[in-house]
Image (tube, rainbow, N blue to C red):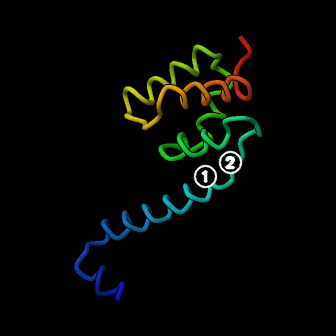
Amino acid sequence: MLRSFFSGVDTMWRILAIAIVVFLACSAQAQENIALKPGFGRDLVERRCGVCHSLNYLIMNSPFLNREGWQTEGDKMVRAFGAPVGPVDTKIIVDYLVANYGTGD
């Protein structure tokens, strides 16, 4: 069945299709291995933030962001990218990120 699917597709498209499948599989595997620190709001962060980007994004940015920085990031995700997060949930998410991944400033 796969052979018939790919029979009319040139080699470049075959390679691209395979590369996309491998990339998505690796991304899904990488996402599963991210474990956030325990704390109030972690489940909300995993549900709301993890639906659009890797939770590793939070860990990578943690050395640079204080409360103001995390608040700015949260506001940007809602306003610019349309994240479906209300003000109450945004506050819980920011409080969790400041307590567990903030710079302390």
Residue at the image position 26 percent from the left and 72 percent from the top: 10
What amino acid type is highlighted by mark number 1?
A: Gln
Q: Looking at the image, which is closer to me, 47 or 27?
A: 47
What is the x, y in percent for residue 68?
Answer: 58, 13
Along the horizontal axis of the image, is 102 left or right of 68?
A: right
Q: Relative to 14, does residue 105 appear above or below in the rendering? A: above
Name the mark on residue 34: 2
Query: Quadrant of the image for the N terminus?
Result: bottom left
- Looking at the rendered structure, the secondary structure element under dot 1 is helix
Occupied quadrant, residue 92: top right
What amino acid type is highlighted by mark number 2?
A: Ile
Q: Looking at the image, which is closer to me, 1 or 19?
A: 1
What is the x, y in percent for residue 30?
Answer: 62, 54
Along the horizontal axis of the image, is 26 left or right of 12?
A: right
Pointers 1 and 2 in contact (C-beta within 8 Å) = yes
Q: Relative to 2, does residue 52 appear above or below in the rendering? A: above
Count of numbered circles on the image? 2
Name the mark on residue 39: none
Residue at the image position 62 percent from the left and 34 percent from the top: 58
What is the x, y in percent for residue 102?
Answer: 70, 22
- Looking at the rendered structure, the secondary structure element under dot 2 is loop
Q: Relative to 62, does residue 9 appear above or below in the rendering? A: below
Q: Which residue is mark 1?
A: 31
